[in-house]
Amino acid sequence: MISKDSDIILSVKNLTATVEETPILKGLNLEIKAGEIHAIMGPNGSGKSTFSKILAGHPDYEVTGGEVIFQGQNLLELETQERALAGIFLAFQYPIEIPGVSNLDFLRVAYNSHRKHKGLEELDTFDFEDLVEERLDVVKMDASFLNRSVNEGFSGGEKKRNEILQMALLEPSLAILDETDSGLDIDALKIVANGVNQLAKPENATLMITHYQRLLNYVVPDFVHVMYDGKILQSGGKELALKLEDRGYDWAIEEHEAALV
Amino acid sequence: MSTQFATQERVSYLTQLLNLRSPANSDFSEIRDRAAVWLQELAIPTTRDEDWRFTDLSSLLDIQFQAPPKVEISPETIAEFVLPETAQSHLVFVNGKYASTLSNLEALPEGVFVGNIAQLSAQKRDRLGEYLAQQPGNEEVFTTLNTASLSDVAIVWAAKNKAIETPIQLLFVAATGDAPTLVQPRCLVVAEAHSSLTLIEQYTSTTAGCPDAKGDRVYFTNSVAELWVADNAQIEHVRMQRDAGNAFHIGKTAVTQSRDSRYTCHAIGFGSKLSRHNLDVFQAGEGTQTTLNGLTLISGQQVADTHSTIALNCPNGTANQLHKCIIDGSAHGIFDGRVCVPKAAQLTNASQLNRNLLLSPKARVNTKPQLEIVADNVKCAHGATVSQLEEDEVFYLQSRGLDRQASEHLLVDAFGAEILQQIPVSSIGKILSQCVSCRTYLT
Ligand SMILES: Nc1ncnc2c1ncn2[C@@H]1O[C@H](COP(=O)(O)OP(=O)(O)OP(=O)(O)O)[C@@H](O)[C@H]1O
Ligand SMILES: [Mg+2]
């Protein structure tokens, strides 16, 4: 939902970053306002996951230039957990498994760290279980997943749903979904998309990274961006995604290169 | 570098330790004498002995130990070690001697004897010779020293067909004075045919607060536990070594299993400056099941060594071992596990895994899982892993709002939980998991 005078949630200006000295992001610009849903599409290796992990504060990447302002704060100065507490949430492309840590304990500790940050009392085990059961409904997940180790032995789709469950609990102001739709069958896709739509509010924003138009039929973006070689080449409305699906990325890259000459 | 003592000194040091024993009791004179003769041929091992390569006992030899003093300790001191599950089923030994006023056995059902040797019925006393100091591997030096010094024995004896539900706690408390002290606890456990019991064998000290806190008192616990699991009997055994931070602990667990019996050991080693656990299981009948779970948690300058042997001697036996070490600071963990599968042990199934988590750059581990297989129709697997905390796991947790310390804490906890959750007495798992977080993050 676009509204001209909404607050700016995220402003990225000329961001450059490297991994092990190799430049990956090469001058990325993006602005996201409250209430908006954005989608980034782009070929494999163009830097989409890198960008999302940099926003989350992953230590493998070094920011070499530019700025990222998140709700008025310099995001790049914050530690990973400070970013999470400030309202950034990344649903990982490949959520990792953590053997031995119960999913329920993990969710409770994560949820309570946010409560504590807001100066609220932590929820005890019983109250928290009630809350989780209610949120499980957002992703139509079975309660039995709570007693298993975090993501351990979960199918691809179950892992993605577990990410959205976390998002439903933590209620971020910026949710970044890195290919949350990949590997989902149509029923799971609808469930995930439905969850994302339920959680989208006028005061928060969503950034989806995807390869497929299919997701965008269910979660309709206000803006679509094409990413290539560490930059946003082109931005448009939802019709841009249809054009990309139809014609691939080559035309966008050619147009971009032609403009450079 | 520590000095290597000449052989003569290591022999005479052993004699000095033997000379600390109390006068013979007629029950034991024969057993003691036999062991004392063996001892003349033995010496304190050096790192040149294959079995002690990584565990250097030189610092022990620097200390002049004395016999334990006579002390009275109050029930309040003991109360903190007694578990809710064993409030009326605990037997207390102070400095290796039975403390009747501190023990409470009111909740024990019929069919099990728990007490010291003096309380044993004449009938059972007649059968003692079948069990006491009769385990294979008795001639090991520290076991021999303990046997040669025998003066009191904690005994648990479950009668045939009796399923003892109430867990039984044997609490061996070191209450030492300023002088370095040698304490030599001993216990004997007999589970007759078709019986079952749960045993908690615990070593600790009266040092206030955290039992494995760095006390200033130096003592040396040299313990021996002998367990006999008869046909189709079952023992769940929790062994908790939580001697004080300046203590030496050398402990033997010797188990002989008869046909179709089941033995599970949960060996917990948190305490002592230097500790060694010798765990020997001998499968003496067909179809026996052995499960060894272990968790070592050490930090600072601690050294903790686990040497285990499972001898599968008969067909259709199974052995599963998982030993984990959490090593922080400059501590040093050692694991040496042998699983022997001779020709006679066909159709057996053995697995052994040692997993180590190093929490600091100076933490060290030496691990040597060993399968010695001669039989050809068997299923065996073994391995060892050494890892640090996974950065990706830490990042995942941090990205959900946990700070670095809370993230690491959750992961360390999870590493230990795999062992602690299997302990059949639930309060122990809870107490120990608190200790895991406290020990790894407050020191
Ligand atoms: N930790 C890393 N170490 C080395 N190279 C990396 C690392 N992370 C990313 N890269 C490289 O950076 C480039 C961009 O990768 P990234 O994962 O961001 O692409 P992507 O756009 O998300 O691709 P996909 O559509 O396949 O998910 C790739 O060439 C990748 O190999
Ligand atoms: Mg990607």
Image (spheres, coloured by chain):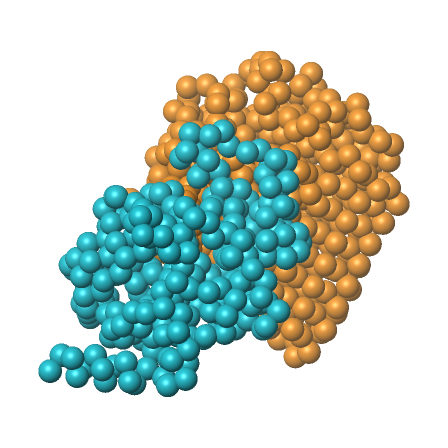
Quadrant assignment for the C terminus of chain B: top left
Q: Where B186 sits versus B217, above or below?
A: below
Q: Position of residue A118 (x, y in %)?
A: 41, 33
Horizontally, residue A12 falls left or right of residue B336, namely: left
Q: Where A108 sits versus B261, above or below?
A: above
Is any part of residue A213 visible from this angle? yes
A203, B82: nearer the viewer = A203
Q: Residue at x 72, y 73 (%)?
A: B347
Q: Position of residue B111 (x, y in %)?
A: 86, 35
Q: Residue at x 50, y 57 (%)?
A: A196
B329, B89: nearer the viewer = B329
Residue at the left extreme, as displayed: A261
In the image, the chain rendered in orange is: B
Q: Residue at x 28, y 80 (%)?
A: A252
Q: Where A211 sits versus A116, above or below?
A: below
B398, A26: nearer the viewer = A26
Residue B259 occupies quadrant: bottom right
Is any part of residue B5 visible from this angle? no
Q: Residue at x 77, y 34 (%)?
A: B166
Residue B76 occupies quadrant: top right
Q: Position of residue B129 (x, y in %)?
A: 76, 42
Q: Where A79 sits versus A15, above or below?
A: above
